[in-house]
Image (tube, helix red, strand yellow):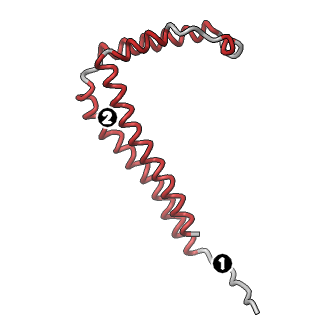
Amino acid sequence: MKPLIWGVFGLLALCWTGLAAASVQITEWLLTLVGTGQATDLATAAGQWPVPDWLALWVDPAWVKTMQGAWLGLVQWLGQVLPSGSGLMAWVTPLVWIAWALGLLCLLVPAIALHWLAGRLKLPPRPARG
């Protein structure tokens, strides 16, 4: 039982670490796009994307156009108000890893409790083969 507990903990910790590392990389990439103005160009292109016919069956095209306009406005606003990406990454990266550490602690505490509980659990003896 204990190896299973720690195996699950290890798998979840590995996934959590990968998510944190990917978050740092994606945030750095997005801030670079915003800093160079490429994000605004990309958002403008996405804002002009026509709603496909198959999507119009499921979602109101006017709603999609409204969402496209909102995202374009947000990206343009971020491009104007954000400082340089490198300055902001100096704050974002430590915050991501602090959140990672708190999340790992939230995984570790139940794993330790389950390990302790599994050690106190008395299993019935196995019958002798003979």
Residue under the point 57% across and 71% down? 118
Quarter of image, res 87: top left
Horizontal side, residue 64 vs residue 84: left or right: right
Residue under the point 43% across and 9% down? 44
Q: Secondary structure at mark 1?
A: loop
Q: Residue 77 shows which numbered tag?
A: none
Q: Residue 92 shows which numbered tag?
A: 2
Please, what is the three-letter code of the amino acid marked with disc 2?
Val
Identify the residue under disc 1: 123
The x, y position of residue 52, in whole percent, is 63, 12
Say few, some or many: other residues with alpha carbon within 10 Å of mark 1 (under 14 / 14 to 19 / 20 or more).
few
The x, y position of residue 115, in whole percent, is 52, 68
Please, what is the three-letter code of the amino acid marked with disc 1?
Leu
119 w.r.t. 19: above or below:
below
**Where does the N terminus fall, quadrant-wise?**
bottom right
Residue under the point 71% across and 13% down? 57
Q: Residue furthest bottom?
A: 130
Say few, some or many: other residues with alpha carbon within 10 Å of mark 2 (under 14 / 14 to 19 / 20 or more).
some
18 w.r.t. 30: above or below:
below
